Each structure stands twice: as C-alpha cells, then as structure tokens.
Amino acid sequence: KMSSDYSDYFFLDDPFLLAISTGFGLLILCLFLTLPHHVPKSVPGPGRYLPWLGAIPDLFMNYERFPDYVVDAMILYGSGVTWGVPMPKVGVVKGSAFFVMSTEGVKHVLKDNFENYVKGANVRDTLEEFLGEGIFATDGPVWKFHRKVASRMFTNRLLRESTLIASKHSTRLIEHLKSKCKNSNNNATEIDIQDMFFRLTMDIFTFIAFGEDLESTTRDRPHEFATAFDTIQGFSEKRFYNPLWKINRFFQLTAAEREITKSTNIIDTFAKKVIS
C-alpha cells in the first residue's frame, strides 16, 4: 500500500518526463564539469562575472582583431600588467587563459620555469596538419631534439647565404613590380602588396629549406604549395574557437576540414617530390 501511494509522486512510468529529467540532469552535469577555472581577483580581465561563459563573448567579438584587442587590454589594464580570462573547459583552450605582458613574466615562462609551460596534446592535435611534430608544436625531449637541429641553421655562413638568397628574391620582386607598372599603359594598376610579401616569404624560405624556387612573385597566381600552406594555416587557426572541430575533421563535415585535407595532400606531394 505504501509503495503504491509513493508511486503517485514519481514519474518513472512516464517516458517523456523521464527523458526530460535525464536530459536536464546531463546538462547540469556537463555545465558543472566544464565550469571555467577561477581567475584571482588580483589578475584583471573581462568576463569575470558572466556565469559559465566567462570571457567567451568578449573573445568571439574581437577574434578577427585579436592583436588590436590585446593592445587595447594593455592600455586598459596598464603596460606590463598580466591579465586573464575565464572560459568554459571545452575546445582547445580549456578553463582559462592568461596574457603575460611583463618582462619578468615572459622570462619566468620562457626561461626560468620553461618545463612547466607546455603546448600540450590539445594544441599539438589542433595544429597537426600545419606544424606536424616540429619544434613549434612539441614539448620535452622531442622539442629539445628539434631545437638542437635548428640551432645548426644559425651559423654565420648559412646566415650570409640566406641573406643573399633573400636579397636575390627581393630584387626579382621589385623588378617584377616595376615591369608590371610600366606595362600598365598609364592605367591604374592594383597590387595586393600583402599577397606579394607572402609570396616573397614563401619563395625565400622554400628555397632556403628545400632548394626549390617557387617563383611565386612572378606568377599570376601563387604556387599551389604556397596556397596550400596558407590554407592550412588559416583553417587550423579557426579550430581554436570551434569545440566540435574534431568531429568535423573525422567525418569531413565542413568545407574548412575538407580544404585542410586537400591542402595537406598537396604539401605532402610537394615534400615527397623534393625528397626524392
């Protein structure tokens, strides 16, 4: 009799109410498990009083002008003042982020306590197609190995040779731009100088690293290797604010992930050709 009376107050026999209560419980659990880290009051920064979301809205609104946003924050909080932002524990950067602005802080991170500040598996996985297992994406012994190999590139002889290569390619670009303007027949000629500087950078470093001359600065369109490199860089960076990017990559759901896959194949083909 007692169990029968108590059953009147439960909804376990109602599938709809059971589903609603289960979903609500899981939502509360997910919100709890992804709560932002606590950022001390002594550290200034936005989003301190916004429940769960923290500084996410502020970061999203300023993502496309991030360098300017950091400068604005430096002016607001003071030059050399480290500031931080709380954010949910989802995506690549989980829980919180700190912007180290002081000389002492940078020295602490990069020199005095370097072993404690790692890029981590999340960042390495996010930038895998772009940086692979190179010096910019690894930690620990692997990083030390790449650092040792890279240090051999900074000899006086190699720096002189690299400077000559850079000078040669820069001169070629200048001559190309002069010719292009001269052949315009006094008509207005539009030149995307940022694009030309990107092509120049790719030409120089590809020649230094691989001994291959892309001749991007004199082409109507950039070399496909340069285009693929730029594509992977751009779309990989956008993974940082997309918590579902791993699902998108696995199932190739978005145009961005399909472009990364396509561009990775182009770069691999180019590299294999150079090696062979």
Image: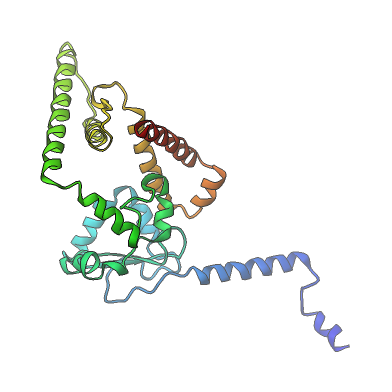
In the rendered image, the quadrant that contains the N terminus is bottom right
Colour convention of the picture: rainbow
In the rendered image, the quadrant that contains the C terminus is top left
Q: Residue at x 22, y 25 (%)?
A: 191
The outermost residue toward the right is: 1
Q: Nearer the viewer, residue 139 or 171?
A: 139
Give percent across and percent down for residue 233: 36, 43
Q: Nearer the viewer, residue 54 or 105?
A: 105
Residue 138's place in the image compared with 193, above or below, is below
The outermost residue toward the front is: 276
Residue 246's place in the image compared with 167, above or below, is below
Residue 267's place in the image compared with 98, above or below, is above
Looking at the image, can residue 139 be seen? no
Looking at the image, can residue 187 be seen? yes
Q: Residue at x 57, y 45 (%)?
A: 251
Give percent across and percent down for residue 65: 29, 49
Residue 162's place in the image compared with 133, above or below, is above
Q: Quadrant of residue 117?
A: bottom left
Q: Residue at x 32, y 52 (%)?
A: 62
How many numbered tags mark residues here? 0
Give percent across and percent down for residue 273: 38, 30
Instruction: Left or right? Give the position of 25 relative to 269.
Output: right
Instruction: Left or right? Give the position of 82 relative to 13.
Output: left
The outermost residue toward the bottom is: 2
Give percent across and percent down for residue 123: 39, 56
